[in-house]
Amino acid sequence: MWDTLFNYFDSLTVNTFIRMYWFLFIIEIPRYLLFDYFILAMYWLRRISTRKQYKDAQARFWQEKPLISVLAPGKNEGVNLYKLVKSLSDQTYTNFEIIVVDDGSDDETPTIGRSLEKAGFIDLFLRNEVRGGKASAANLAVRYAKGKYILHLDADSSLDRNAVERIITRFYMDDRIGAVGGNLKVRNGQESIAATMQSIEYLMSISVGRIITDYLGIYRIISGAFGAFRTDVVKRLGGWDIGPGLDGDITMKFRKIGYKVAFEDRAICLTSVPTSFGKLAKQRLRWNKSIVRFRLRKHFDIFLPTQNFNFANFFSSLENVVFNIVFAFLWLGYMIDIIIHYPEMLPLILAVKFFIYTLINYFQFFVLLMMSERWRDELKLLIYIPLKSIYNGYFMRIVRIMAYIKEMYFYSSYTDNWNPAKTSDKALDHGKL
Amino acid sequence: MQKESFNIKSRFDRSRLTRSSQENQSQTRETNFVINEFDKDILVIRNYDDVKVQTLIAYDVVLLDYFKPTKASEMLSQIRASVYDEVYLKPVLISTHGNSVSPIDIEMADGVLNSNSIELVLDVVESISERTEDVLKVSSDFKGRKMLLKLMRFLYTRDRALKPIPTPKSHTGFALPFLDVNIKTEDYQELIDLLDSAEERGLVQADYEDSVHLCQNCNSGFINYRETCSKCDTHKFKSQHTIHHFVCGYVGPESDFLNGNNLECPKCDRQLRHIGVDYDKPSLVMECENGHIFQETAMKTFCFNCHTEAKPEDLITYAVNTYELTASGSDAAISGKVKEKGESQDLEGFVSLMVFKTFLKMEVERQRSTNKTSTVSYMNLMLCPKTIKKHQSDFSDFINEIARLIKSQLKSSEIVTFLNDEVFLIMSPEMSIDETSTRLEQIREHTKGMIRSACEGNKNDEIVFETFEVTTEEGTESVLDKINNQINIF
């Protein structure tokens, strides 16, 4: 075997090497290793240099002690509610009201919610008898929110003790910040291999990606699982629009009306992720369809030279479209090219790629562990790192490509039962909102 | 019955009674008169201002003309509330003259007629009369509350049950007409205790009819059930449907959308035209005067009578029963004798009422020669319902313990009798009213303290007493009458 490998590398010319591995060396390593980790280093330097400003912001926050409205809309989330309110009750910052909206649950959620409300764990429990979708549930909560800031949570999330304080403090760093995204980590990573791979993904790809975009001022998606918003702006916008993809949509709307959007990696929220690859694929199909639906359709005006044109917003959407959609199809072309032209070499190419990716992934992993507040727990992911290249490099890419094709040609997000048909139909009728 | 057999018979206040005839019907509309039918003197009352209740003893039957319902009801109540057996047991009929008769009056009367003839109820009247005669033959030494004996006699002579009547006129919502006219509204607890104890002693049998939920403070049944804010208990709130606009996902109360008669989305300005197509109403949201938002109301009660606000679970629930005399109750009604709970003649240091009276007579005689004043006092235990219920199983022992406690504080020269569960009579020789009152005050306070601390009593348990001077002029009966007027016990 070693002979074969030696002979293979010995026979490679520079041209053939580039021909076979151009996607790795021209796109992926520069973009996801060199660029990202350069920015990450800059980000850390900036954090050190702005330490005083952060402290001052923290002092202003504690001086003002604003009321925060914690919103947790959802369907059949009753079983998660106690865990949620328990983690909230243990926060370092406690001046908040909790509003839970039950979006037409058909389980014990109303009973659990009402009893928690009666016991004082929840300030307001609202139930919609008829399911209206996530946006409508969140909007009902917004309507009755009294806080200066809204903290939107998924009911199956739980927060680090200082998460509320940290995410809201970010608003006091810059008055132009309208919304702040929190840092999500996986709570149920040990439940299955699919969940474990997502733990690695959240740690190495999603968090890092958000840190980079935040540093560059093009952060574009505040997750509904843990995001903070200025209440007055959310109300001005009329809340969330119909999903799927409503998180990215409202973030874009904040940017469009001139507010900055920030990511606070020190505000940690643990969230539950799908535990099977089937469910994961379904979730990611939904997420990726929204890139087409919102970036290429609803907010396409970002790319147009209108009077509201803004470079940051332009690059924010452009980065998203290029690195997700364009690169996904580029990768597809690359793979087809390799399969057609080097079918006999394919196993070897894949093996070499796997080896290189794994080396890179271990490097990234250790760098991130040094930055992580719970590195001891995350160290357990060490043995799964080699799988990341398959998970990210193949599984996710295939899902992504399928999502783009489905949405581009079949508008399939409008038939996703994640949203009730009555709302999706209307969104489709009224100019594909 | 034939009209020609009517026979006018004058009795009391003859000048005001007139002959009944076809010719002077219009004149007699305001006049009382007596008719004799089936050998019974029937007083027909039309002018209620002209009648004194005690005078009704003279007639066999009283017929109330319902021409003036209010007056007739008042008279009926007065008759049934009378302290004289001969009066409250009197057969009383109502002549409707086309007026509708209140259910309470029907329950208290012995029959309702459309004319002045008693033919239709003759059997009833005779039965009542016979039974009343039986009762009156026996002089009662009933050792208990006179009210209970009165009730039993009433039921026995009518051979019927005491039925609860639902009526807004009753304090509780259910009237027990005969008892209600005898016991004041504020003593409703006494009424309940009376019936409970009668049932406990097997004198009446209770048959469940309904339940009432009464104010914990005043026993009123007139309770308003209010939906209130679950956060601040105010009942002033408004409820609104929320509207979900499908197109833009906006959700808010209906008022957010109202623009004149139209519904317009505040987020996207589109007009909402068709429920189910453009929008739906997924929930109902309430907002109280203090700005609290809620979907589930709390329930509070408000008493119309005393304005007490409470939770529904704080209301007192009572069973409303029909009470029927048992065989033992009938015996007690006739004989006037029944073994009372807590009867304590056997207790050491106490004398019977008869012996007490003898001592009192002797004391009056002694006073004549010594010229010194003496006093007779009553001391009435008024235990609150909680204490009574608590000691239900050992009530006799509990009462005897209190009796011993009181006795131990009296002087050896003082004579004391224990009339029943509640009342002691104390004769204090050679003591003035002031001296006795001061001592009894001390005894009362000490005993109340002991009931609370040593006998598992309640802070609401009360002891009342009053002292009367025994004078040689008035004699023994006079002082006892004075006491009886206060406590109506013997």
Image (tube, grey):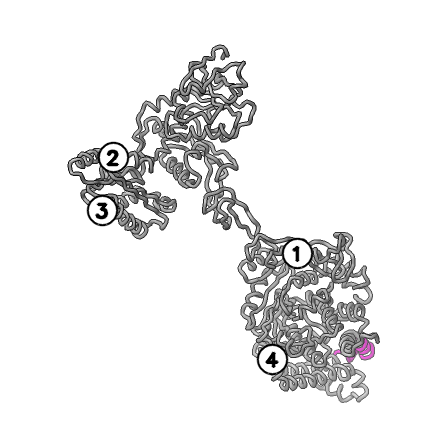
Residue A425 spot, x, y in % from top left: 78, 58
Q: Chain of mark 1?
A: A
Viewer-side residue, A126 vs A186: A126
Looking at the image, do the residues carrying marks 1 and 4 touch, with CB atoms under 8 Å apart? no
Q: Amino acid at mark 4?
A: Ser
Q: Marks 4/3: CA distance?
A: 84 Å
Where does the image place residue A311, in percent across and percent down from the top left? 78, 79
Q: Are marks 2 and 4 on the same chain?
A: no
Dot 4: chain letter: A
Q: Image quarter for residue A137? A: bottom right
Write down the region rendered in magenta: A332-347
Where disc 1 sits, the SS reads strand
Q: Nearer the viewer, mark 1 or mark 3?
A: 3
Residue tagged 4 = A372
Residue A57 visible? The answer is yes
Q: Are marks 1 and 4 on the same chain?
A: yes
Task: Identify the secondary structure beneath mark 4.
Answer: loop
Q: Which residue is mark 3?
A: B408
Q: Are marks 1 and 3 on the same chain?
A: no
Disc 1: which residue: A128
Q: Earlier in the sequence, mark 1 or mark 4?
A: 1
Label 3 Cα neighbours within 10 Å, binned few <14 / some 14-19 / many ≥20: few
Amino acid marked by disc 2: Leu
Residue A58 position, x and y percent, is 59, 78
- Residue A80's x, y, as percent? 59, 63
According to the picture, the residue beneath numbered tag 2 turns out to be B353
Q: Residue at x 32, y 45 (%)?
A: B463
